[in-house]
Image (cartoon, rainbow, N blue to C red):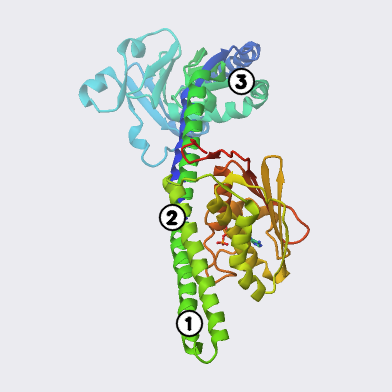
Amino acid sequence: MKAVWFTLVPMLAVAVLMLWGGERMARRTTEERVPADRGRLFDFTASFREELDRLDALYLQHLDELAAYAFRRSANQLSPHCENTVGIRKLLVFGPEGKRYEADGKKPAIGESSRIPQVLTESEAGRVSPKRAVVIPKEILEGNTPGKGWLAGPDSSHRVYWFRSSELYLVAFVIDQEELDRCLEAHCSTWMKVPFSPLSEAGELVSIQGPSGRPWLEAPPETQAGPAALVLPHRTNLGEWEVLAWDKLKIRSQHDPTVLASAACIAFVLSLAGIYLHAQQKRALRLAEERVSFVNRVSHELGTPLTNILLNLDLARRALEDRPAESRRRLSLVHEEVQRLGRLVSNVLTFSRGERRTLELRSIACTPDEVVEGILAQFQPSLDRRQVRVEWQRGASERTRLDPDALSQIVGNLINNVEKYASSGGWMGIETSMLGEQLHLRVSDRGPGIPADQSERVFEAFERVHRGVSEGASGTGLGLAIARDLARRMGGDLLLVSSDKGCRFELVLPATPALSVITQDNSSVA
Ligand code: ADP
């Protein structure tokens, strides 16, 4: 049975995929920029600039004071001052005739000392020409007016600040720009906690780019969608900063109803097709199983009477001379078994003709009670043996036109079932009556009955309340199906009606003096 799921499950999976893919295809997302209130940003940037300017002025003032102090001091005296000032790697004092002396600042980390550039005068540079050097131009060195300024280093890691007093001495500082940046960043990150809080509370998308290209404040992840909406730069002697701000993005998601409806329709159709195929396969599988079981049952049903026939014939032959009564009894049992075989064969033939659409009914003049009497007579010995008392209320003794063979097959199947399943009740009731132009026939018993939930299913071919070959009485599961089919082909019906105990089957057939019987091809047979 599991094999049938191999159709339904993949088709349902495809339907789900279809729905999912359709939803993705139908989805339209639009991004809308929501301009932020820039008031808070401008306030912060103003105070940030102010702070940077203050630090810049403070630092330069410190360098200027140190430069003024350096005049006529020894290198040993200057070194502690240099070590205590952020970023100073070297201090050099030049006279008009060239370098006078130099003092070291804080010791650089291992590996960094080779990066500190040398500071040379133009005449020194012509002689030595080292790779990493900052050359002080002649006009700065030999100028006689006070001044100060910056000289770029061989790379962005170091710069030189020069300061010249009116006494014609020039002081140069080698500044480690990276250390200075780190120190500024550490200071500012503490400083900005308060002024930046209104922006972070409002969820504004802001970042700050430091002078070394490193972000001081990382851009929030939502900003990766595009470039900043506003860039506020600021420049001091110590470096360049940028405050960047983004607008918030509002993402709207809508679905194209046509695409969505098409995907839903395809998924629905696929699911329906899957369910339909699944049901068909299940049915086909069930039918195949039933047919196999049917063949088993027919073989079983044929085997039992044949054994009985052989046995009884043998016993009858032996008793023929000495005990003729016993011999007659045995022969009548053989007769019963042959009739049983005949009914079985006729049921199988009727079913197979019905299946092949070759079943034809004939309508001839007959008396329903006589037909019932004939079939009842066949069962009487067996019913007597099982001590089933038969109570028959006759009421259909008029001659009517119907198919007597079909009627006797229906009644035979009903009585056969009483014999097989309800003999324990010890009673069978038959009622026949003519109501208007209808024959009513009722067969009742006081056996175990049929559970209400099976009352319709027992009329389906191969359906049995007890399905196993060895379970309960034997049978093919065709009797009631054939009986109802014949009744309906004759324009009537066979129903199982509720009763207090046992079963009660009601047969209704059209029965007029000029009865029209509906045949397989729907043509009327008189
Ligand atoms: P089967 O060949 O099995 O007798 P039927 O179509 O005649 O097939 O009957 C279908 C099932 O209905 C039987 O297997 C039996 O379980 C149940 N049934 C039919 N008639 C009676 C009855 N009078 N009492 C109890 N059960 C019955």
Question: Label 2 to label 3, Cα distance in Å?
Answer: 72 Å
Question: Which class describes the residues within 10 Å of circle 3: few (<14), some (14-19), or many (20+)?
Answer: some
**Element marked by disc 1:** helix
Q: Nearer the viewer, mark 2 or mark 1?
A: 1
The residue pinned by badge 1 equals 311
Q: Nearer the viewer, residue 247 or 111?
A: 247
Question: Label 2 to label 1, Cα distance in Å?
Answer: 35 Å
Question: Label 3 to label 1, Cα distance in Å?
Answer: 104 Å
Label number found at residue 288: 2
Q: Residue 388's x, y, as percent?
A: 70, 70
**Element marked by disc 2:** helix
Q: Residue 512's x, y, as percent?
A: 63, 40
Q: The disc labelled 3 sits on which kind of residue?
A: Glu
Q: Earlier in the sequence, mark 3 or mark 1?
A: 3
Question: Which class describes the residues within 10 Å of circle 2: few (<14), some (14-19), or many (20+)?
Answer: few
Q: In which quadrant of the rendered view does residue 295 lie?
A: bottom left
**Element marked by disc 3:** loop
Q: The disc labelled 2 sits on which kind of residue?
A: Ala
- The residue lying furthest to the bottom in this view is 322
Q: In which quadrant of the rendered view does residue 401 lie?
A: top right
Above or below 474: residue 126: above
Which residue does the image show at 41% across and 16% down from the upper left? Answer: 150
The residue pinned by badge 3 equals 204
Mark 3 vs ligand 1: CB under 8 Å?
Answer: no
Q: Residue 209's x, y, as percent?
A: 49, 22
Which residue does the image show at 50% across and 16% down from the upper left? Answer: 228
